[in-house]
């Protein structure tokens, strides 16, 4: 019985502690269920403890708020059970893999320089005629660009309305 959490780099330490503490409560209840008032006259079932598997790459996306999961108060409990995966499976171009490793440690200037050596071109102005992917540093820039591109679409606007039936339940 295991719970697996993928993309752990995006979970903050507080949320991880909440999950671990909840699992501890479940496991303590399972171990002490012979004293459970709801089990009167029944044979107690000894369940295997619930476990937790964390999967992810801390060099990828970080939590929106809070500190990284490995700053959790309960992180020490994982120290003897950490496995590092070191083989790259999805890329076979060694120079690109090395470049990704440099980017992961935050050396953006070096990455930019190496990308230029490989023929990548950086522009300080947006090329309105370019039909490929345009990357922005900030969400606001991407949102503004997308709004402009939507206005360029030459087709009629289709609008639909929604109809809500039934009674809205309170939260």
Image (tube, helix red, strand yellow):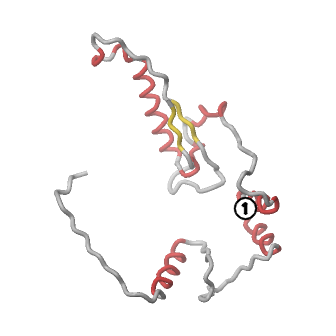
Tell me if 128 is positioned left or right of 86 in this view: left
Q: Residue 110 appears at what percent x and percent y?
A: 78, 67
**79 vs 27, nearest the viewer:** 27
Question: Where on the picture, by quarter, is residue 43?
Answer: top left
Q: Residue 85 appears at what percent x and percent y?
A: 71, 43
**46 vs 21, nearest the viewer:** 46
> What residue appears at the point 32 percent right and 17 percent down from the top-left corner?
36
Tell me if 46 is positioned left or right of 54 in this view: left
> What residue appears at the point 72 percent right and 51 percent down from the top-left corner?
89
**24 vs 166, nearest the viewer:** 166
Say above or below: 53 vs 31: below
Q: Quickly name the residue at label 1.
A: 103
Q: Residue 10 appears at what percent x and percent y?
A: 55, 52
Say above or below: 37 vs 162: above
Tell me if 56 is positioned left or right of 144 in this view: right
Furthest-left residue in this view: 167
> What residue appears at the point 46 percent right and 32 percent down from the top-left corner?
23
Say above or below: 21 vs 149: above
User: For numbered disc 1, what is the local secondary structure?
Assistant: helix
Question: Where on the picture, by quarter, is residue 92?
Answer: bottom right
Say above or below: 145 vs 88: below
Residue neighbourhood size for the residue with mark 1, other residues' Cα within 10 Å, grouped as few (<14), some (14–19), many (≥20): some
Q: Residue 160 appears at what percent x and percent y?
A: 29, 76
> What residue appears at the point 30 percent right and 16 percent down from the top-left corner?
39
């Amino acid at each position: 019985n295991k719970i697996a959490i993928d993309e752990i780099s995006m979970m903050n330490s507080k949320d991880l502690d909440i999950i671990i503490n909840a699992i501890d409560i479940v496991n303590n209840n399972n171990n002490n269920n012979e004293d459970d008032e709801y089990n009167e006259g029944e044979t107690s079932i000894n369940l295997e403890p619930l476990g937790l598997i964390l999967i992810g790459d801390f060099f990828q996306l970080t939590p929106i708020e809070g500190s990284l999961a490995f700053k959790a108060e309960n992180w020490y409990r994982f120290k003897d059970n950490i496995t590092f995966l070191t083989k790259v499976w999805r890329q076979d171009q060694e120079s690109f893999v090395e470049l990704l490793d440099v980017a992961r440690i935050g050396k953006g200037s070096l990455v930019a320089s190496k990308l230029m050596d490989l023929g990548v071109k950086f522009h300080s102005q947006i090329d309105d005629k370019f039909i490929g992917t345009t990357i922005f540093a900030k969400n606001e820039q991407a949102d503004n660009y997308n709004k402009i591109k939507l206005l360029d679409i030459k087709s009629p606007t289709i609008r639909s309305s929604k109809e809500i039936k039934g009674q809205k339940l309170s939260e």
